[in-house]
Each structure stands twice: as structure tokens, then as C-alpha cells.
């Protein structure tokens, strides 16, 4: 078992109101690099930002790290196009962050990223991998890909109020820039990514396809972004028996309809509740209030805790408190 | 605690008779990439080579992986200049492998590698790091650096019979190519690396200096190559309280005099015996016969096993058998 996180950036995240993964666009861009450091080291070590919202909601990487520490799960970070350097060890499958999808051709190297990820997925020796993502703005590009493929065009949000109409207008602009209509990229997943996607979607899809080809069981750990990656796999014509493992926070988000999307794509679906309700902790309260919801493999990490007979969600919450305190230790500057 | 392995290549390894880390130079060049994969995944996954000698002696990465699996130690792979791609996640601190030291200026980017590694070392949050290396031909470049610095010019070998006179003639050629005499680089470690070193030595030295600056305890996990890195730290004028942790196989190599070298450099010295004597296993017999001896952090990994109250060397040997069987599993092509 290995938990893989595919990371990257898209300039789409800079559109005002799109993402909660960092209040300030100048700092937001560091979030995926910081997430990978948090996953590798238990705290950001070089990225000049701790991904914690003003209300105290930390990046889901804190939950995922708590789970991997608790379970001793090995991890792998994949750089599909980070805009800022990370001190986390990575396998690089793409060199460039994605562009703003409104401006057309946001991922010109989609095929190269998909191919390199597929080779990596084929080479992993694990019987099972759990694949997550970190890319601010990623639900908008997921909506773009779902729309281009002609799939159910609905996604979740890291904000308590999902700015779906804003996302839809951004995706409309992307399709207009590519002179395309919804569904035009059906059966051509790389065209969908090139039209309105991001490099992380290409990376996750390639990784999943390669792993399936090698006989590895693949769990997609996330919500609508991972469902969009599954849609890419489906439209590649790959017969994959995939599971979508997300959090109860995404599953409970009526605006996202992630269970319906999973059913459309023949994905086994599971949502895991970390039991944050009633907890007297700023991180857990923020998730209960609808912030963040998912990301950095959180839903898959929670499923692993749920499956482990020797670990409980209470253990996970106790570990989360420790990771949170470490991340926000005295002297560390919180810059979001 | 984190075990860090700095990897790279030097064309010096291609000199006939220098290294046992791969019988065939065309395959030898893949050894460090394969070692990092073995450390990350428990087996080489993409590198087209299993680093096992014709007599059945596997790369020390097998022992180090057995220890990190047994103890649950987190690892970090640092690419200081690999000549071949690896599917292991890495932090890249150098882009180019080192040249053949006989041809002059083998590491023109020594300062950049040292600087990037130093920043990485400063950023690591661990209280202790254990730092090893993988670079075929590395004992020759270590001899080059020790000679250039004017330190005790004696090193170990991955071969049962240490080709010291060959190494010395190679180092003489390196110094001649740089118009330098032994000791000319005293007090100028980067000059020593540029004259007769390799990128891994620059990487290990920079990492150690950065970690010491951050208050991290540093154990150099290896033999004469790590002692050469310590000499670079010493000649940088850094007051570091370093430990050299090597294997009993290096300590017992009279040709290397590693304990004397450690004493010269004020290094705390320890050698750990994995208890391979009398074992009925091809890997253990090969080490007992003087092959490989050390590398990929093996000595430091054994020290960690020795320090862990809940683990024994018998546990390590049992785990080594499992890792060895996995690495040599049916269907895997052994190409060395």
C-alpha cells in the first residue's frame, strides 16, 4: 500500500473567489509545495506558508499526514507541474504549471504528463495505491474536464458556499477560447485536459491507468477532482475497477452530487466520516463548518484508518491534534 | 529521525577495476538510481538493473531498506547528479553527474550543489539525520578529496582486494590535470571537490553543514566516503559534532584505516556488526567475504537497529532475507 499525491498549480486558481486553499493569491501558489512538505516531513519546511485559513482550517494534508503517521503508510509525491519549489522529494512528471483555462490551451504538455505518469504507475510494485491531489483551483478545472467530456458538470468546493456559477462561467470561457462545446472532447481525455483541465488531472489519470495495467488496485482519494480523473480514465477506454474514497464533508455537499457522479462513472464509492462533530478543536470545527472538505488524499487516508483493525478514528483525531500543534508551533509564521 | 541518501554518478567509475558496484560499466551507471528505488519501494522498479554482483552480493541498499522497514524510519533521497533517471522521489540539488577526475574539473557546479544541499539540510525539521551515499566509484573521488585537502589518503573498497594503487594513480592524474599538489586545497573544500571530487561529496557536505546550522544531530552513515565528506565540513571551518557510523566490514578493512581517519577529523566513530558470520545466505556470505562492505547508509542503518530496544540484529537479518527474496523474485532479470 502506498499513498500517492499528485501536485501542481494552475493559474486558474488566481481567479478571484475560486479557491479557499489560501486567501492571498501570492501565497496560494505555494500551497501544493507546502502540502507535499507537510506530507513528507510532518510540517512545511521551506514553503513560505502554512496552508491554514484565517478561521484556522488547516490544509487536509494535516489529516492525511496524521493518518500516514498513525498507520505507517509509505507515501509518494508526484510533481505534475508545481509553480514553486518544494523541499519534499518528488518524482517529476511535468515541468510546467497549468495556465488560466479562460485563456485557452492551459495544458499543452498534457500528453507528456499523462505518459510519464502512466509509466510511473506501471512501475509501482504495490498491490494497492491510494491517489490524491493538491492543486488550488482544481475543482474548477475538474468542472472544465467534466464539461468537455460531456459528463455530469458539478463539483465540490473548498469554500463553505460553493461558487458554482463563477466556476461555470470560467469553464464556459475556457470552452469558448477553445472553440468547443460541452461534450466535444468525449472519448478524447487528453483533448479535455488540453481544453479546460490542469496538469494534475493528467497526472492522476495517467498514474491510475498505468497502475491498473500493472495489476495494482487503485483507490482515487478525493471528491469531484478525483471523479474527474476517473472520467478521463473512462474516456480513455480503460476498463478499470476504481474506487472513489472521499470524506463525509464532500459526500454531504449537495451542490457536488459526488455520489451521482461516481455512479455515472461506475466507480465504487465510499465516504468516511472522521468524527469531527462536537470536537473542541479549531481544525475539526472548521471542517464541520464546511471548509476545505477534502484534498491531499484525505478521504482515502480516512478510509485506510477505517479499514485498520488496530487503529480508530479517535486515534486519528488524537494524532491530528499533534500534527496540527506541530504545524502551528510557536515561532512559525502563519501567512494565510 | 530521518535517513537521507545522497545519490549521483561520476564518470570516474568507468575506469576499469575501480568499482564492484556493477560489473558492467553500461549497467553500473544505473546503480544509484536503482538503489534509490530499492530504498523507496523495497525493490528496483524502473532502473534496468538489480545491483547484485555475479557472486550474489546485493547492493547495501538491501540492508538499509531492511532496517528502515523494520524500524519504520522515514527516508529522503537527494539527487546530487544522477546520470540516469530514477522512479524514486528525490530532492534535486545538482543537475549533472561528475566527470572523470583524470580529465580535470570533474564537478564545475560544486558550489551550487553544496549550496542547495546546505539549504535543504537547514530546512529539515528532524532532531537527527543519518546521511549515506550511493555513487559508484565514490571511494576514488573520496581519495581525491582527502588528498587535495592534505588529509590521510586512504580509502576502502567495494572489492575484496582494494585496488588502492590504481586509485592513487587516478588521483595523481586528477591533481596533475588541475596543476595541483596534495594539500593544495586545504581550507577550501569546494576547490577540493572541483579538483578531484564528485557531486555526492559536495551534497553530503552541504547537507551536513546545513543540518548542523539548524541544530540537527548528524550521523554520517558510511566509511571512507563519508569521512571524506566530514573532511570537507572540517575544512569549511564548521564546528560540527559529527558521528561516523560504518559497518564492521569497513572497520575491519586494514587497507582503509577508517578509524584513524575518523580520529584525525575528530569524528565520533562507531562500527556495527550485523552478525552475518556463519549465516547460510548468499548475501550475508558475500559481505563476510569482503564484498560491498558499506554504502547507501548501511552502517548508519545498522547503528539504528542496534540502538532500538525493540529490534535485534536477528530481526534485521530476517527482514534482509525477505527484502533479498523480493529483489530477486522470479521474473526479475539480474543483469549484473
Image (cartoon, coloured by chain):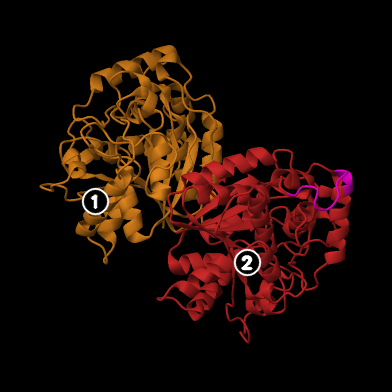
Chain colours: A orange, B red
Q: Is residue B116 left or right of residue A266?
A: right
Quadrant of residue A285 within the rendered picture: top left
Give A226 or A302, whichever is nearer the viewer.
Answer: A302
Query: Is A44 included in the stretch rendered in magenta?
Result: no
* Front residue of B1 and B314: B1
**Circle 1 — which element?**
helix
What secondary structure is the stretch in magenta mostly built from?
A: loop
Residue B184 colored in magenta in the image = yes
Q: Which residue is mark 1?
A: A321
Residue at 88%, 44% (x, y): give it: B177
Looking at the rendered image, the quarter that the C terminus of chain A falls into is top left
Disc number for residue B60: 2
The x, y position of residue A75, in whole percent, is 43, 52
What is the magenta range? B176-186
Considering depth in this image, is A42 or B178 the residue closer to the camera?
Answer: B178
Can residue B232 be seen here?
yes
Assess disc 2: are there few (<14), some (14-19) or many (≥20) residues with their C-alpha within 10 Å of its C-alpha: many
Amino acid at each position: 500500500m502506498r499513498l500517492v499525491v499528485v501536485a501542481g498549480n494552475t493559474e486558474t486558481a488566481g481567479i478571484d473567489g475560486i479557491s479557499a486553499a489560501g486567501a492571498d493569491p501570492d501565497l496560494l501558489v505555494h500551497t501544493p509545495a507546502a502540502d507535499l512538505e507537510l506530507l513528507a516531513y510532518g510540517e512545511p519546511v521551506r514553503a513560505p506558508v502554512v496552508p491554514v485559513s484565517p478561521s484556522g482550517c488547516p490544509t487536509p494534508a494535516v489529516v492525511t499526514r496524521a493518518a500516514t503517521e498513525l498507520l505507517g503508510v509509505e507515501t509518494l509525491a508526484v510533481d505534475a507541474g508545481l509553480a514553486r519549489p518544494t523541499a519534499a522529494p518528488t518524482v517529476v512528471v511535468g515541468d510546467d504549471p497549468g495556465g488560466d483555462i479562460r485563456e485557452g490551451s492551459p495544458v499543452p504538455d498534457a500528453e507528456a504528463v499523462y505518459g510519464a505518469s502512466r509509466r510511473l504507475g506501471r512501475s509501482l510494485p504495490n498491490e494497492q495505491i491510494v491517489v490524491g491531489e493538491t492543486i488550488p483551483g482544481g475543482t474548477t478545472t475538474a468542472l472544465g474536464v467534466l464539461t468537455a467530456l460531456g459528463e455530469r458538470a458539478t463539483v465540490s468546493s473548498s469554500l463553505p458556499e460553493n461558487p458554482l456559477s463563477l466556476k461555470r462561467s470560467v469553464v464556459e470561457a475556457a470552452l469558448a477560447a477553445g472553440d468547443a462545446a460541452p461534450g466535444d472532447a468525449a472519448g478524447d481525455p487528453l483533448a479535455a485536459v488540453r481544453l479546460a483541465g490542469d496538469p494534475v488531472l493528467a497526472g492522476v489519470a495517467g498514474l491510475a491507468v498505468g497502475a491498473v495495467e500493472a495489476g495494482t488496485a487503485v483507490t482515487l482519494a478525493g471528491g469531484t477532482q478525483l471523479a474527474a480523473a476517473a472520467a478521463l480514465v473512462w474516456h480513455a477506454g480503460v476498463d478499470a475497477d476504481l474506487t472513489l474514497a472521499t470524506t463525509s464533508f464532500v459526500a454531504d455537499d449537495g451542490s457536488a452530487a459526488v455520489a451521482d457522479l461516481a455512479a455515472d462513472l461506475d466507480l465504487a464509492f465510499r465516504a468516511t466520516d472522521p468524527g469531527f462533530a462536537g470536537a473542541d478543536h479549531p481544525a475539526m470545527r472548521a471542517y464541520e463548518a464546511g471548509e476545505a472538505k477534502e484534498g491531499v488524499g484525505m478521504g482515502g487516508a480516512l478510509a485506510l484508518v477505517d479499514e485498520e483493525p488496530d487503529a480508530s478514528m479517535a486515534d486519528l483525531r488524537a494524532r491530528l491534534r499533534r500534527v496540527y500543534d506541530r504545524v502551528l508551533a510557536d515561532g512559525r509564521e502563519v501567512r494565510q
